[in-house]
Image (tube, helix red, strand yellow):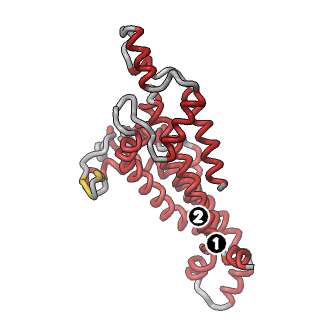
């Protein structure tokens, strides 16, 4: 019920905010057309109706999953977004899962041996990931690996293979090479965040009685890190992982623009530039739904990871 209320409030804010920006009629038709044609176009798209009535029609369509048709592409908005979604999913999942698989072990090692040279080097990488803007890193990656070394392509999606009616890049070598730079650009901030979070949690847990008792029981250090430390620091890691997955999927705009990656982020930038209102509204609504769903999933994961929550619920 809270999610429904949140979605209603967001829908109103998004609708009013988007419809207060510019006049799409100026983009859709030539300025040389007659006033009669202009008025016919306005009536055809319902722009002559009061804003509250347009919002009511929008809500009715939203309930049935109808986001309208794109002014520019002249096709259903949902189909347009879904056609671009696989490209965004590829680099997003590669970046976030890669950052998690690499960042959590590195962060745990940095917390386990904080004074070692390797730990200091790991923390130096994390500072770099936090400090440098992603657009600047993207340009440097293109300059080094595409322009100077010529090892990787500078943009585009490369060769794709059709699977289950959807085109994917990761199934071809050329597509993987095109994915590498944008995925690295997206992953650096996530990697730095997970390293610092895992390090802080590990340092805190290593001082607890749980670790002392495990060592007294004769368990190896690797077993302690894997079975005790990782389990105790899992909840903040899962929270950050879920939120970063949602934010990366929703806001990979800069990376997709720099690398000319034909995903949802580039679509929304193009739609804003031409005032394609249905695409803008649908994108923001789907992003809101995505974050609400991720938050719900993270809350459910809490109960699976923390026995205290299950015990509290059963009592």
Which disc is residue 76 wearing? Answer: none
Q: Residue at x 49, y 63 (%)?
A: 102
Left or right of 289, for residue 312: right
Residue located 59% across and 77% down the image: 225
Q: Position of residue 25 (x, y in %)?
A: 44, 19
Q: Is residue 312 left or right of residue 252?
A: right
Which quarter of the image is occupied by the N terminus? bottom right
Residue 241 spot, x, y in % from top left: 56, 59
Q: Secondary structure at mark 2?
A: helix
What is the quadrant of residue 69 in the picture?
top left
Residue at 71% across, 79% down: 314
In front of the other: 45 or 273: 45
Give the class, few, some or many, for how many residues have Cα within 10 Å of label 2's Cα (few <14, many ≥20).
Answer: some
Q: Nearer the viewer, residue 253 or 288?
A: 288
Q: Quadrant of residue 113?
A: bottom right
Q: Which mark is residue 238?
A: 2
- Check if mark 2's residue and mark 1's residue have beta carbons within 8 Å: no
């Amino acid at each position: 019920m809270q999610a429904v209320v949140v979605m209603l409030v967001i829908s109103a804010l998004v609708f009013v905010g988007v419809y207060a920006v510019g006049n799409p009629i100026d983009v859709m038709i030539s300025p040389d057309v007659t006033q009669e044609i202009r008025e016919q176009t306005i009536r055809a798209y319902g722009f002559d109706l009061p804003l509250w009535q347009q919002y009511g029609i929008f809500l009715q369509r939203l309930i049935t999953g109808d986001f309208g048709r794109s002014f520019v592409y002249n096709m259903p908005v949902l189909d347009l977004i879904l056609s671009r979604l696989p490209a965004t999913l590829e680099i997003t999942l590669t970046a976030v899962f890669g950052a998690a698989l690499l960042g959590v072990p590195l962060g745990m090692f940095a917390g386990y041996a904080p004074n070692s040279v390797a730990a200091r080097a790991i923390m130096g990488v994390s500072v770099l990931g936090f400090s440098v803007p992603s657009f600047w890193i993207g340009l440097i990656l293109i300059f080094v690996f595409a322009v100077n070394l010529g090892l990787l392509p500078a943009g585009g999606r490369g060769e794709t293979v059709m699977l289950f009616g959807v085109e994917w890049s990761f199934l071809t070598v050329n597509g993987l090479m095109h994915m590498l730079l944008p995925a690295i650009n997206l992953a650096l901030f996530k990697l730095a965040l997970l390293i610092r979070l895992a390090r802080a949690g590990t340092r805190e847990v290593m001082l607890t009685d749980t670790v002392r008792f495990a060592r007294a029981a004769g368990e190896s250090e690797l077993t302690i890190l894997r079975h005790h430390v990782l389990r105790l620091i899992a909840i903040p890691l899962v929270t950050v992982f879920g939120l970063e997955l949602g934010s990366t999927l929703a806001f990979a705009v800069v990376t997709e623009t720099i690398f000319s990656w034909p995903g949802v982020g580039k679509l929304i930038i193009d739609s804003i530039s031409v005032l394609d209102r249905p695409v803008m509204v649908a994108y923001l609504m789907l992003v809101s739904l995505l974050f609400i769903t991720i938050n719900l999933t993270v809350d459910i994961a809490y109960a699976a990871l923390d026995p205290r929550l299950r015990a509290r619920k059963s009592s």
